[in-house]
Image (cartoon, grey):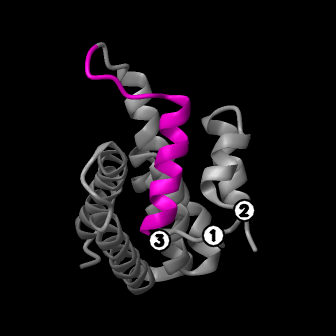
Amino acid sequence: MSVSLAEIFRREKDLASYRCAVIALGGDFPFASAEMIALGEAYFERFPDRERGRNAEEVRLGYAIARVAIIEKVILAAAPGRRESYRAMLDDVSRVGPLVEALLPSAGAAGLLADYDALLRALTDLKTTIDEIPKGMVKERFIGGISNIFNILYVLRMNLRSRGRD
């Protein structure tokens, strides 16, 4: 049985080490709404939310923690040889154009469009799971994390269109 994301978060000292530990799992971790809630609770143990004097950096960190896990699940939908590129794109929108250009010769337009469709379906399925989380701060962190990834997929789609691959 694999270790939970909440346990990993509690064990790791910062976002970078958490990210490395999650990536090392290769997407092989449970990620239903109960696991999302447990991860959110672990996050709030370390970074309690406040009504006043909210720490914007801690809020952004919460989004980043959610994004790491979401990305690892979403990229499983792509061709294995291209997952690292999609991980990089979904983590940093500025890498979309250069990585699409690098992938086109080997994957072809049809391959990248198929990946895009698969990534979008996987992300939409995760959004459905996030919608199961009760209203509150945990859900807000996951919504903030997934929204960024939807935006990056939009940029990916526009990038493919601008290259006449649509």
* Residue displayed at 40% across by 81% down: 118
Q: Which residue is mark 2?
A: 3
Which is more foreground, mark 3 or mark 1?
3
Q: What's the distance in space between the residues labelled 1 and 2, CA to CA? A: 7 Å
* Camera-side mark, 1 or 2: 2
- Relative to 148, is 87 above or below? below
In the shown orientation, is residue 162 left or right of residue 65?
A: left
Label 2 – label 3 distance at C-alpha: 14 Å
Residue picked out by circle 1: 29
User: In the drawing, does residue 12 fall left or right of residue 41?
Assistant: right
Is the residue marked by circle 3 packed among few (<14), some (14-19), or many (20+) residues within 10 Å? Answer: few
Q: Is residue 89 visible?
A: no
SS label for mark 3: loop
Along the line of sight, which residue is nearer the eye, 156 or 97?
156
Report the magenta residues as a range.
Answer: 33-52
| Residue 32 tag number | 3
Residue drawn where x is 55% and y is 76% of the image? 76
